[in-house]
Image: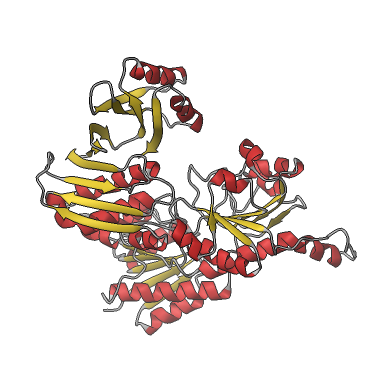
Amino acid sequence: MTYKALLLDGVDAVCAEIFKQRGFEVTESPKMPETELEQIIGEYDAMVVRSATKVTGELLAKATNMKVVGRAGVGVDNINLDAATQMGVLVMNTPDGNTISTAEHTCGLIIALSRNIPSAVASLKEGRWDRKKYLGTEVHGKTLGIIGLGKIGSNVATRMKAFGMHLVGYDPYTTHERAAEMGVEMMELDDLLGYVDYLTVHTPLTEKTKGLVSLNNADKIKPGIRLVNCARGGIFKEKDIIPLIEKGIIGGVALDVYSEEPPTGEIAEMLKHPAVICTPHLGASTQEAQGKVAEQIAEQIADALEQKGYQGSLNGKSIALSTNKEVQPYLQLADRLGRFISHIAPTHTEELSVTYSGTCAKHSQVLTDALLSGFLKGSIDDVVNLINARYHAETRGLKITETQSKEIQTYSDLITVDMGPKSEYRVLSATTFGDNDFRIVTIDGFSIEIHLDGEIIIYRNIDKPGMLAATSGTLAERNINIASLSLGRNVKNAQAITAFTVDTKLEQADIDHIQQIDGVDVVKYASV
């Protein structure tokens, strides 16, 4: 059988060469209008894109012969993964192809900031000889803060350590042991911001990382800090950059990514400031990287269609399990439980022990994958799913143990997670009560029912009259409506665990107000 592949977005020529060597018919189009693409997409078995083409559910509905969509690169924000999975279309990426190029670009921007290289080049080309004006600073002996110690962040650490920089990092999902192997001292985020001379970020854009540096936390930042962002636009609040420079908080900024690409309006104006270095999203733009990802994706797609291998697959297990009605509820339960514990687990969690009881125990391996996927989502600058969750966990030093229990439990199916002795809430058990009804049923021996859905507040409190009224009153003062309540007690007038679900997302100030209530302790907030 001869397969047909459609290559879009100007993917490197080696991609077509590999496909042709493997016996594929190939059509290349660097820029295809959406209407034309919709007309021809039904002819093809495979498609390769970069970031320009939007692979929507509507487009996939017309791709009646499509078997594989490949992204020549890492991010798959432009591919509707859920729609592809539902239609049985395999989605692949090349997660390692851009690592070196992005790390090198980051290091280059750090040096460029230190030595004023772009401004000095422009000045000399305009006929000036401004040696004193562009006096630089050495990076040797300075402190570099790295937020996100995944593939790219760890490569930056290796390279800048060779320059003689002191390395500190923040990554709540990387263990202290793994960081020490990289020569990185772990710090809490606020402490890091007030300590480092340079800061580079290698995380996804989430509610937690959006506006990581802004006027709102200027008082926590070491004056004169130099910032580098080759990860996601918006991690530094762009409209605050110039005010922060003018206040002397920021000494310089190097940006390769923007919240709007190409930048316009305020962002474009900000880039004109002499203390700002900017490049047009070039982190992965090297001949080697583009050739590498094009070659990798072609080989991966050809192997998949010929059933030789599925390296780089992002939804292979999801497709296989999507029709298995028995395992689906447990997968959803495990994913939601993972998301919940990601909010309440201690930073730098070193171990997760998972015990399965009942029918779900025979699916323990894939359920642990789902739990880890939920636990790590939003913290890693890469797609995290059933296929690669263990890999990401292991590279961060997280130890996983699985046990299948035959002990008779109150509930017919139970997933229990032990987060280790450093966790303020250590052992949680959860089960499913029916379609889309997933609940935590015990926490550290307290019987409780917490629906794993929406915005959840959990805290310990002294079991005495007035505690519930005090907390609900605090929420009411802040116009936060309670949707449901659950209470777990051990013995009368001793300790209790209380959980609320609320109708709106909470700010840190809301959590702080609850924490200040006399008798309330260990307040945690999770969005599931």
Report the coloring of the rendering.
secondary structure
Q: Residue at x 62, y 70 (%)?
A: 162
Residue 467 left/right relative to 415: right
Q: Position of residue 197 (x, y in %)?
A: 67, 53
Residue 221 left/right relative to 452: right
Quarter of image, res 155: bottom right
The foreground one among 193 and 369 is 193
Total marks in image: 0
Quarter of image, res 475: top left
| Residue 326 can be seen in this image | no
Q: Position of residue 74 (x, y in %)?
A: 46, 63
Q: Position of residue 156 (x, y in %)?
A: 57, 64
The foreground one among 523 and 464 is 464
Taking 379 as reference, is 5 above or below it?
Answer: below
Q: Residue at x 88, y 60 (%)?
A: 132
Quadrant of the frame with the N terminus: bottom left
Taking 201 as reference, is 505 above or below it?
Answer: above
| Residue 302 can be seen in this image | yes
Quadrant of the frame with the C terminus: top left
Q: Residue at x 45, y 55 (%)?
A: 380
Residue 6 left/right relative to 483: right
Q: Position of residue 330 (x, y in %)?
A: 21, 48
